[in-house]
Image (cartoon, rainbow, N blue to C red):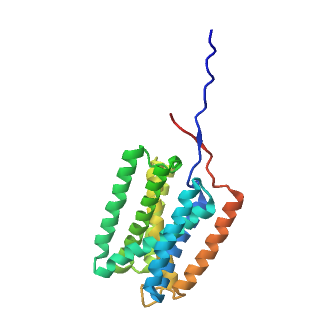
């Protein structure tokens, strides 16, 4: 009689993105504001410098993140911060050729929708908890980048073309971002849908706050503290919060068993 071979446990896969909690949303919103302010500040100093920082910074940050193969707070949030800077440039750059905000907002909305469709068709899920492979991580970062550009275009649409101004835009997007949270908490909205809707909306919310603080009163009713000051202060707060997460590791997801 032969002895059956013992069952082999499936391998445990490490998540490449953080668990979602309050600090995730706080840091995410801060990075959007920092990216908006830093991009505008650098563009005002030297456009070539701005493009160099945006492109090279994004390339280095994503290389470090993809090379890590697992989530660490410092590399992940560095990548998000550089996506914020580059995403702002990508959305703002198309306006230099005269394209209206409504058109660019629609364009980036279609790009995000297309990425979601391709991602779900390939992997069968858009869950933040399923990003445990290189291919899913690539889909994730492509979607994040497109969502930043979409959020930037939508924020510019409300603040400039619709002439709401920065502070009213902050109110509009603060109310809008509460909708998926309430829908998930009280009305059974799918958590994956709620997450991605809120994720996209953090971009125009954070960017509108940064513009309100940094831009002069003559331009959208800002407070006039300066883009450089806003970017610097946001970077300091982000660094402190990311340092806290790096030490506590409270946002590291538990390994997930691979499915055969």
Residue 186 versus residue 92: which sits nearer the camera? 92
Residue 65 pos. (x, y %): 55, 60
Picture quadrant of residue 200: bottom left
* Residue 61 appearing in the image: yes
* Residue at position x 63%, y 23% in the image: 6
* Residue 174 appearing in the image: no
Picture quadrant of residue 43: bottom left
Residue lying at the far front of the rendered structure: 2
Residue lying at the far bottom of the rendered structure: 218
Residue 146 versus residue 65: which sits nearer the camera? 65
Residue 179 pos. (x, y %): 45, 59
Above or below, comparing residue 147 to residue 57 in the picture? above
Residue 233 versus residue 220: which sits nearer the camera? 233
Residue 134 pos. (x, y %): 49, 51
* Residue at position x 38%, y 73% in the image: 91
Residue lying at the far top of the rendered structure: 1
Residue 148 pos. (x, y %): 44, 67
Residue 115 versus residue 217: which sits nearer the camera? 115
Residue lying at the far right of the rendered structure: 247
Above or below, comparing residue 223 to residue 185 in the picture? below
* Residue at position x 42%, y 75% in the image: 89
Q: How many marks?
A: 0
Above or below, comparing residue 227 to residue 246 in the picture? below
Quadrant assignment for the N terminus: top right
């Amino acid at each position: 009689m032969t002895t059956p071979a013992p069952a082999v446990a499936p391998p445990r896969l490490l998540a490449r993105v953080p668990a979602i909690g309050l600090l995730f949303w706080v840091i995410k919103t801060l990075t959007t504001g920092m990216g908006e302010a830093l991009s505008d500040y650098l563009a005002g100093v030297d456009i070539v410098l701005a493009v160099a920082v945006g492109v090279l910074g994004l390339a280095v940050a994503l290389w470090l993140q993809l090379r890590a193969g697992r989530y660490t707070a410092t590399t992940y949030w560095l990548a998000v911060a550089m996506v914020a800077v580059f995403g702002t440039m990508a959305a703002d750059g198309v306006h230099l050729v005269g394209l209206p905000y409504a058109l660019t907002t629609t364009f980036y909305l279609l790009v995000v929708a297309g990425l979601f469709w391709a991602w779900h068709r390939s992997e069968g899920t858009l869950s933040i908890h399923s990003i445990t492979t290189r291919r899913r991580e690539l889909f994730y970062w492509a979607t994040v980048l497109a969502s930043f550009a979409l959020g930037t275009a939508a924020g510019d649409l409300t603040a400039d073309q619709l002439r709401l101004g920065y502070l009213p835009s902050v109110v509009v997007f603060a109310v809008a971002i509460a909708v998926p949270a309430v829908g998930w908490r009280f009305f059974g909205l799918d958590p994956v849908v709620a997450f991605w809707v809120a994720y996209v909306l953090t971009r125009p919310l954070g960017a509108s706050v940064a513009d309100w603080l940094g831009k002069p009163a003559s331009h959208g009713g800002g407070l006039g503290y300066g883009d450089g000051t806003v970017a610097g202060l946001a970077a300091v707060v982000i660094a402190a919060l990311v340092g806290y997460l790096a030490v506590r590791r409270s946002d590291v997801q538990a390994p997930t068993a691979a499915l055969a």
